[in-house]
Image (spheres, coloured by chain):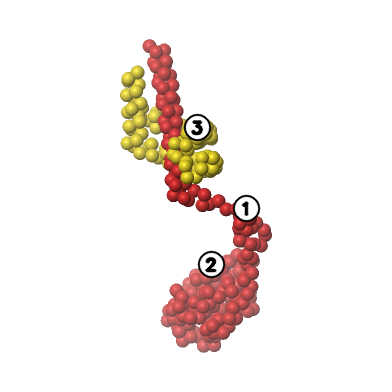
């Protein structure tokens, strides 16, 4: 098991060091904006804020309300594309 | 042993797949958190609701999608056929030709000195009563060059007496107009073109060397 976690750690490190993680982040952000996910989530945020009150809303409130919905609403095509790139990276760099 | 290898690699594959999913999950979580932070900051800084407008003003600025109008609802080609009066030479010029005309008329454009030089040279060489309004014709901007009765200036007309090699798109005895696109003391470079509908046809490019008053050599 520790061999497993060592492999994971190595991969994650490589991902960060080679800049691939940042590129993937940017790619994801761009795709999510393109497909309207960001606008959807912003609209949901507005509701949460109206509910909790503009003055009193905290980061925690938003995180708790937004994150589960956000995860669920990511379109499959975006997921597929990201996974494709991740798998490509892994096949190149996982020994 | 082969079987073991196969099962080992499929195990690896499922591990890698699991890893890929975890990485994706991290990235998505990151994106969500990023959004939350952005929104929270916007709320606290007071600019979150800035782009909300009421329905009525939204309707005022809706995109217009009608023929003949641009997206703001303005008519966009109503000045096409208007005429402007040049403040320098007091002539009436079509709106679309106004800017280039001003360039030459005021002697300030990119090519105005070239044209002025050319005029001096051709004024010396030929006996033609060259009119002062030669500024309008310049080969740099060929799009508006049309041959018709209203064009004067430095267009030389020639009847083509014989058509042979090097000459295209023109009939024998057809009337064509030249433009002089360059000249030195004894050599004229000419381009002959004509416009049929919206196409400009090239007829020929020649250089004419003036050896003396009677002898010319034409190079195609």
Q: In the rendered structure, the residue with mark 1 lies on which chain?
A: B
Name the image quarter holding residue B21: top left
> Residue tagged by mark 2?
B166
Mark 2 and mark 3, same subunit? Answer: no
Say whether marks 1 and 3 touch (CB < 8 Å): no
Percent position (x, y) of residue B100?
Answer: 52, 74
Q: Which lettered chain is shown in yellow?
A: A
In the depicted structure, whether residue B157 falls above or below residue A44: below
Residue in view at x 62 percent, y 53 percent: B55
Q: In the rendered structure, the residue with mark 2 lies on which chain?
A: B
Of residues A30 and B204, the one drawn nearer to the viewer in this rendering: A30
Q: In the rendered structure, the residue with mark 3 lies on which chain?
A: A
> Residue tagged by mark 1?
B55
Residue in view at x 41 percent, y 22 percent: B15
Percent position (x, y) of residue A85?
Answer: 44, 34
Percent position (x, y) of residue B65?
Answer: 65, 56
Percent position (x, y) of residue B106?
Answer: 48, 81
Q: Residues within 10 Å of mark 1 (few under 14, many from 20)?
A: few
Between marks 1 and 2, how big is the CA–CA gap?
68 Å
Judged by depth in the image, the label closer to the viewer, 1 or 2, is 1
> Residue tagged by mark 3?
A68
Judged by depth in the image, the label closer to the viewer, 2 or 3, is 3
- Is label 3 in a helix, a strand or a loop? helix
Residue in view at x 62 percent, y 70 percent: B80
Instruction: Specify whether B171 is left or right of B15.
Output: right
Of residues B179 and B26, the one drawn nearer to the viewer in this rendering: B26
- Is label 1 in a helix, a strand or a loop? helix
Between marks 1 and 3, how big is the CA–CA gap?
32 Å
Give the colour chain B carries in the figure: red
Residue in view at x 44 percent, y 81 percent: B117
Between marks 2 and 3, how big is the CA–CA gap?
76 Å
């Amino acid at each position: 098991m520790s061999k497993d976690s060592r492999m994971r750690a190595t991969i994650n490190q490589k991902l960060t060091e080679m800049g691939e993680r940042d590129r993937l982040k940017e790619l994801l952000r761009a795709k999510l904006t393109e497909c309207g996910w960001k606008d959807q989530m912003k609209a949901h945020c507005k509701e949460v804020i109206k509910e909790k009150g503009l003055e009193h809303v905290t980061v925690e409130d938003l995180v708790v309300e937004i994150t589960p919905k956000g995860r669920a609403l990511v379109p499959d095509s975006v997921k597929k594309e990201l996974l494709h790139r991740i798998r490509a990276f892994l096949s190149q760099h996982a020994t | 042993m082969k079987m073991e290898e196969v099962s080992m690699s499929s195990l690896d594959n499922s591990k890698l797949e699991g890893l890929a999913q975890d990485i994706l999950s991290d990235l998505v979580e990151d994106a969500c958190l990023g959004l939350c932070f952005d929104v929270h900051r916007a709320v606290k800084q007071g600019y979150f609701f800035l782009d909300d407008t009421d329905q009525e003003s939204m309707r005022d600025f809706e995109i217009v999608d009608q023929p003949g109008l641009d997206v703001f609802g303005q008519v966009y080609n109503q000045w096409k056929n208007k005429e402007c009066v040049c403040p320098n030479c007091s002539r009436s010029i079509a709106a679309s030709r106004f800017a280039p005309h001003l360039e030459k008329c005021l002697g300030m454009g990119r090519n105005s000195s070239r044209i002025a030089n050319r005029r001096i040279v051709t004024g010396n060489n030929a006996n033609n009563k060259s009119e002062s309004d030669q500024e309008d014709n310049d080969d740099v901007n060929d799009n508006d060059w049309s041959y018709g009765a209203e064009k004067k200036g430095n267009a030389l007309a020639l009847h083509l007496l014989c058509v042979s090699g090097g000459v295209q798109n023109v009939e024998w005895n057809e009337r064509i107009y030249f433009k002089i696109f360059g000249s030195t003391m004894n050599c004229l470079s000419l381009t002959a073109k004509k416009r049929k509908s919206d196409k400009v046809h090239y007829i020929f490019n020649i250089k004419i060397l003036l050896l003396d008053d009677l002898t010319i050599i034409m190079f195609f």
